[in-house]
Amino acid sequence: MLSLFAPTRQLARSCISRLGCARFASTFVNVVKEQNASYTRKALKCYEESKDEVDRKLDPVFNNNPLVLFMEGTVDAPKGQLSLNVVKMLTEVQAVPLVTVDVTEHPAITGYTVAKSGSEVTPHLYYNGNFYGDHDRLLSKYKNGELRKIGTNKRS
């Protein structure tokens, strides 16, 4: 029977030290960055191998739509936190009509938008056929009010 006054086992302080947690977090971030870089290299290679076909299918999207978002998932079901954040920002500024392309459907789609934008981290927003920003740039434009310029009735 366990006594209320029985000695309790204590964890060694080194197991939960701040330095240990910092090392773990740093290692985790580096692994994720390397995985993203590796996927981006593969996506660019895949895009280069089928460049003509991918361009033929995706270039008309830019010609026919003022706002195009390359994201993970769809507006109704984003597959990543960055994509979800961008959808929320664009919804708030009423950036419609918005056409989305799911980059998770094929690596060549990711390669296409990375090659076109020069930014390795999706989502990517294009405005009137030009790269407008990735998540971090859009967040900055959202905070300073510049993103509102592409909202409803603000486009030329």
Image: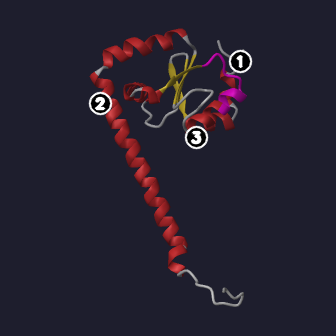
Task: Count residues near mark 2 (Cα–Cα under 10 Å), then give few for <14, some for 14-19, many for 20+.
Answer: some
Q: Mark 2 vs mark 1: which is more N-terminal?
A: 2
Q: Which residue is mark 3?
A: 81
Q: Mark 2 vs mark 3: which is more N-terminal?
A: 2
Task: Count residues near mark 1 (Cα–Cα under 10 Å), then give few for <14, some for 14-19, many for 20+.
Answer: few
Q: Position of residue 149 (x, y in %)?
A: 68, 23
Q: How is the image coloured?
A: secondary structure
Closer mark to the observer between disc 2 and disc 1 = 2
Q: Helix or strand or loop: what does disc 2 sit on?
A: helix
Q: Which residue is mark 1?
A: 152
* Residue at the extreme left: 49
Q: Residue at x 72, y 29 (%)?
A: 92
Q: Position of residue 151 (x, y in %)?
A: 69, 21
- Quarter of the view holding residue 88: top right
Q: Which residues are magenta?
A: 88-98
- Above or below, 118 against 7 in this view is above
Quote the CA–CA distance across marks 1 and 3: 25 Å
Amino acid type of the residue that numbered disc 3 sits on in the rendered structure: Gln
Closer mark to the observer between disc 1 and disc 3 = 3
Amino acid type of the residue that numbered disc 1 sits on in the rendered structure: Thr
Q: Mark 1 vs mark 3: which is more N-terminal?
A: 3
Q: Position of residue 126 (x, y in %)?
A: 53, 22
- Above or below, 139 against 150 in this view is below
- Quarter of the view holding residue 51: top left
